[in-house]
Amino acid sequence: MKIDIFTDSSVFIEFFKKNEKAVSIFEYLLENVDKFRININSLVWSEVVYQLVIKRKFPKNEVINVLEGFRLLEINNSVVNIANELIGELYPNDALNFATSYYFGIRYFITLDSDYISNDEIKVINNVLNFKEII
């Protein structure tokens, strides 16, 4: 059974920009594709497409093809209610992403954003060494 991981937009954006941390995270995921299932929501999809295709002019098909390889989770009323409790600790978009992970029972959250902090339910992963703790 694969381990579910939620991936924040920062990792995708930085990967396309060739950020060393993001590249090493994706390389590790590809090497261990049989162990992990990557999850995103429509907010992550939108942020990545906006930042890479609209602002930075990366090829649309290239960005979309990468995103299509991941499971898309719904932002529903329950997710929004959880996010409402997180606003103040996190910005609204960040709260929705963390709430999505929490609602769907995903215990691992990949991000390069320093706003997120691990808690009892969710472990924040921001480098390859964090992955080695999981396996």
Image (cartoon, rainbow, N blue to C red):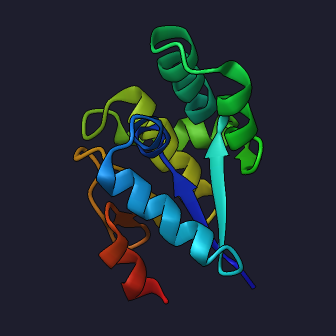
> If the image is split into quadrants, where does the N terminus sit?
bottom right
Towards the viewer: 20 or 105:
20
Q: Is residue 59 visible in this depiction of the protein? A: yes
Towards the viewer: 100 or 71:
71
Q: Residue 50: percent from the left, percent from the top?
A: 54, 16
Q: Residue 113: percent from the left, percent from the top?
A: 29, 44
Q: From what the image shows, is residue 90 above or below residue 69? A: above
In the image, is 83 to the left or to the right of 64? left
Q: What residue appears at the point 51 percent right and 22 percent down from the top-left corner?
A: 52
Q: Residue 19: percent from the left, percent from the top?
A: 33, 45
Q: From what the image shows, is residue 25 above or below residue 60? A: below
Q: What residue appears at the point 68 percent right and 42 percent down from the top-left corner?
A: 66
Q: Residue 12: percent from the left, percent from the top?
A: 50, 41
Q: What residue appears at the point 44 percent right and 29 percent down from the top-left corner?
A: 93
Q: Is residue 107 visible in this depiction of the protein? A: no
Q: What residue appears at the point 34 percent right and 34 percent down from the top-left corner?
A: 87
Q: From what the image shows, is residue 98 above or below residue 129? A: above
Residue 121's quadrant in the figure?
A: bottom left
